[in-house]
């Protein structure tokens, strides 16, 4: 089909996904903001007073980029997995499959919906963070590119989870048993420089560590990892996951019976 047809299909799908996010903003955007406020109250104020500084900055300021990134990851992933899986269960996904839509349009449309929700949540969390600490942007390009790319990566991850899921339990397993532990161990609340050598080397296997630290570098100018390596990890995951999604949609994995 023509490029114009695909562009219209993509715009329509993205608009549908965005409408879904903002129509139920009390469920999609407000809860992460409240959760982040609790993190700041407990870790930023109570524990932060004892910790003092970390990485050369106030502790509350240090954890702010990590908390923003953690909520971005959870919500961009969760948006796509819930939306696509619902489409499977309600059987209106079949309408897209028989429509003149390229596979990349289906993948990109759902993924961009997850990116929009992730960025909306990140913006809300940033506003909350300003009530507890002073934020700055040391490098605008790094900050924006890392947060967008990270949302894109985890939206793709959510799509893969939704494609493979056969029931609602399958949808919740990855966020609960994979994403949550990796996020908490990804340098959100601490610098990996404080860890013993073995634990520090083990932490370097965690891809979220690179995303959190690259974003922290963009905001605060400090990082535990090399920025070039962080970009390589993020871009590598984005390319591989996008290719996997295209192959799965093309083969009808988890969709066609």
Image (spheres, rainbow, N blue to C red):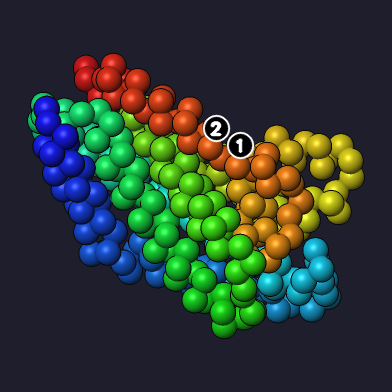
Q: Is residue 175 left or right of residue 166?
A: right
**Visible residue check, residue 123:** yes
Q: Residue at x 64, y 52 (%)?
A: 214
Q: Residue at x 69, y 73 (%)?
A: 60
CB contact under 8 Å: marks 2 and 1: yes
Q: Quadrant of residue 137?
A: bottom right
Question: From this viewpoint, which residue is outermost toward the bottom?
Answer: 131
Q: Position of residue 24 (x, y in %)?
A: 27, 64
Query: Please, what secondary structure does the residue beneath circle 2 have?
Result: helix
Q: Which residue is mark 1?
A: 232
Give whichever of 255, 107 is nearer the camera: 107
Establish if 84 lies above or below 62: above
Q: Position of residue 36 (x, y in %)?
A: 55, 69
Q: Which mark is residue 39?
A: none
Left or right: 21 as drawn, with respect to 157: left
Q: Which residue is mark 2?
A: 236
* Residue farthest along the right direction in this orientation: 196
Q: Is residue 248 above or below residue 53?
A: above
- Based on the displayed image, in which of its 4 quarters is residue 182 positioned? top right
């Amino acid at each position: 089909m023509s490029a114009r047809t695909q562009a219209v299909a993509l715009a329509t799908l993205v608009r549908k996904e965005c409408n879904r996010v903002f129509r139920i903003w009390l469920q999609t955007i407000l809860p992460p903001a409240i959760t982040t406020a609790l993190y700041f109250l407990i870790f930023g104020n109570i524990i932060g007073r004892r910790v003092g500084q970390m990485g050369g900055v106030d502790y509350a300021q240090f954890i702010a980029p990590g908390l923003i990134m953690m909520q971005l990851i959870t919500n961009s992933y969760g948006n796509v997995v819930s939306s696509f899986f619902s489409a499977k269960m309600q059987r209106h996904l079949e309408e897209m499959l028989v429509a003149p839509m390229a596979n990349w349009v289906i993948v990109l449309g759902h993924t961009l919906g997850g990116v929009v929700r992730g960025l909306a949540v990140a913006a809300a969390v940033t506003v909350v963070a300003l009530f507890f600490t002073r934020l700055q942007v040391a490098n605008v390009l790094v900050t924006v590119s890392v947060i967008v790319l990270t949302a894109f990566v985890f939206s793709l991850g959510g799509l893969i989870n939704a494609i493979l899921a056969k029931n609602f339990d399958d949808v919740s397993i990855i966020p609960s048993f994979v994403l949550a532990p990796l996020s908490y161990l990804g340098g959100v609340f601490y610098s990996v420089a404080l860890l013993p050598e073995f634990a520090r080397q083990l932490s370097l296997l965690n891809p979220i560590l690179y995303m959190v630290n690259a974003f922290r570098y963009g905001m605060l100018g400090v990082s535990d990892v090399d920025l070039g390596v962080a970009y390589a990890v993020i871009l590598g995951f984005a390319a591989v996951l996008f290719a996997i999604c295209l192959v799965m949609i093309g083969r009808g994995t988890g969709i066609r019976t």
